[in-house]
Amino acid sequence: MPTTLTDVFRAHPIHLPRSPQPHDFTSLCELPDSFTWTHKDDLLFSAATPDYADSLPVVDLSDHDSAASAVGHACMTWGAFQVTNHGVPLPLLDDIEFLSRSLFQLPPHRKFKAARPENGISGYGVARIASFFHKQMWSEGFTLAGSPLDHFRKLWPRHHLRYCNIIKEYEEQMQKLARRLTWLVLGSLGVTEGDIKWAGPNSDFNGAQAAIQLNHYPVCPEPDRAMGLAAHTDSTLLTVLYQSNTAGLQVFKDGFGWLTVPPIPGSLVVNIGDLLHILSNGRLSSALHRVRVNQDRPRFSVAYLWGPQADVQISPLPKLVSPVKPPLYRPVTWKEYLGTKATHFNNALSAIRVDDNKNNVVGIFGS
Ligand code: OGA
Ligand code: NI
């Protein structure tokens, strides 16, 4: 039996000094101290760079001639991009937003019925990264790995099948898109289907694991002092994000700081995760991103967190390694990496970095 994501999270419960509880945001008219962030709470708290003309590249996936090089360029410069004409039916994006709004609009006691269990992955709760911060984030989330049936039955006793069908269709479409994007990104590095055995005989990443993360950022009385979702990289190969038509997502660009990703109706945001960072031997960097909140509009987003089979060894691809570019990271399974991330958070990549000392490099090349 392949390990499921649920098993992985069960094996790596996050031990918190203080376990954050989901909040009833509607009852908060002022920003409580426990939600007020400063630089002391997050060194990356600085405001976004205003009026920066350059924004996240937009790639038209229907333009086969230019999509590959545009994706390659975007990954090298930003670690993220938006895609249009991606093949995911637009009514399905409306449906997933409808599902998300319906879910988060439920009264708190109904949402708590489907709360994420302490050592589980699926269910309602605060962001998993909440454990790394003393202050609380202005958001609530719902994670789904595997069938939504049990949780949705608790949320919508009479209408759950309708919502389950949306998730099923969304997962199918996202899986198809994520596979295609993964090959586009790898192709831009000169990696071909034969180079990745674990992608399977049909190169379709059969058995790959994924989770869906629904996020809600309620309107906030003092958005400048609040944090929707603190800066992080995703522990995925890549992530495909649908955002409602409200700004909030920001990507960190070296030398420029935080830049807002403007919502483009019908488009999807793609960001490189830590596992592609490792596979590419650091040629691609996982995108550091965060979410800020708004005073007048709530925001909804749906992240499709796409990774390999949990037990496959992920290591810098031989094609991208040479005596002058030795492997920067030791091999890790997704399962193991999630454990490292649960301990080291934003330093997880450094934690698996191979020492730069010569003996180590010689050892790896066996010479
Ligand atoms: C995430 C994430 C961004 C957003 O769920 O990992 O980064 O816009 N979400 O909600
Ligand atoms: Ni993320």
Image (cartoon, rainbow, N blue to C red):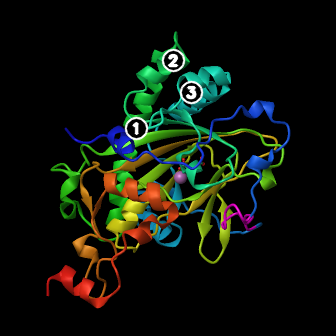
SS class, disc 2: helix
Measure the alpha-carbon separation of dots 2 and 1.
Answer: 26 Å
- The residue that appears at 38% across and 27% down in the rendered structure is 147
Question: Residue 64, percent across and down?
Answer: 39, 57
Which labelled disc corresponds to residue 365? none
Task: From the viewer's perspective, tell me whether residue 133 is left or right of residue 315.
Answer: right
Q: Is tag 2's residue or tag 1's residue first in the polypeptide sequence?
A: 2
- The residue that appears at 29% across and 61% down in the rendered structure is 332
SS class, disc 3: helix
Residue nearest the observer in this picture, 262 or 341: 341
- The residue that appears at 80% across and 49% down in the rendered structure is 33
Q: Which residue is mark 3?
A: 99
Which labelled disc corresponds to residue 173? 1
Q: Quadrant of the C terminus?
A: bottom left
Measure the alpha-carbon separation of dots 3 and 2.
Answer: 15 Å
Q: Which residue is mark 2?
A: 154
Tell me which segment is drawn in magenta.
39-49
Question: Residue 352, percent across and down?
Answer: 36, 69
CB under 8 Å between discs 1 and 3: no
Q: Is mark 2 within 8 Å of ligand 1?
A: no
Query: Given the image, on which type of amino acid does mark 3 rest?
Result: Leu
Dot 1, crowdedness within 10 Å: few (<14), some or many (≥20)?
some
Q: Main secondary structure of the magenta part?
A: loop
Q: Is residue 210 visible?
A: yes
Image quadrant assignment for residue 182 = bottom left
Image quadrant assignment for residue 211 = top left
Residue sticking out furthest to the front = 17
SS class, disc 1: helix
CB under 8 Å between discs 2 and 1: no
Query: Given the image, on which type of amino acid does mark 2 rest?
Result: Lys
